[in-house]
Image (cartoon, rainbow, N blue to C red):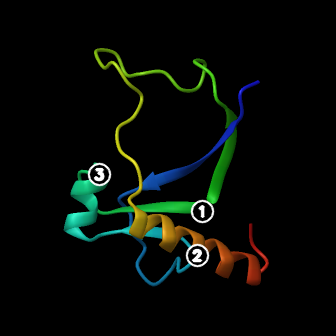
Amino acid sequence: MKGLLEVAYGTTNLKTGLRPLDLRITNFEDLAEIGLPQATRFDLDRTIELPWCKEFFAPYKGYSTILVGKLNTKQKLRLQAIRQRRIKAGRK
């Protein structure tokens, strides 16, 4: 097996104020750079590890790559900070 990838559920239901330990991307410039069409909340309570293989990761029909977008440096740092807060709060 080549490895595992942790995947988080993304939704446009931001639940602002109700889910402080999720990653929200709402800044217009970040959305454009990352490749998200609208503000998105990644539910970090709903993650799953999947093996890196074609069964789970294959391009959509008509596309040549599975990559739709990726977190920029700013959002990667935010995610790391949120993960640390989750650990301190006793959550994964």
- Give how far apart the Cα atoms at labels 1 and 2 are: 9 Å
- Residue 24, numbered label: none
The residue depicted at 72 percent of the width and 33 percent of the height is: 3
How busy is the neighbourhood of tag 3: few (under 14 within 10 Å), some, or many (20 plus)?
some
Q: The N terminus appears in which quarter of the rendering?
A: top right
Residue at image mark 3: 36
- Residue 82, numbered label: 2
In the rendered image, the vertical position of residue 13 relative to residue 91, given as above or below: above
Residue 35 image position (x, y, % from top left)? 28, 48
User: Under tag 1, what secondary structure?
Assistant: strand
Q: Are marks 1 and 3 in contact (CB under 8 Å)?
A: no
Q: The C terminus appears in which quarter of the rendering?
A: bottom right
Q: Are marks 1 and 2 in contact (CB under 8 Å)?
A: yes
Q: Amino acid at mark 3?
A: Leu
How busy is the neighbourhood of tag 1: few (under 14 within 10 Å), some, or many (20 plus)?
many
The residue depicted at 63 percent of the width and 55 percent of the height is: 46
Front disc: 1 or 2: 2
Q: Amino acid at mark 1?
A: Leu
In the rendered image, the vertical position of residue 91 relative to residue 54, given as above or below: below
- Give how far apart the Cα atoms at labels 1 and 3 are: 17 Å
Residue 62 image position (x, y, % from top left)? 28, 15
In the rendered image, the vertical position of residue 38 relative to residue 4, given as above or below: below
Q: Quadrant of residue 50?
A: top right
Horizontal side of 76 relative to 1 (left or right) equals left
Asked whether 32 or 18 is in front, the reply is 32
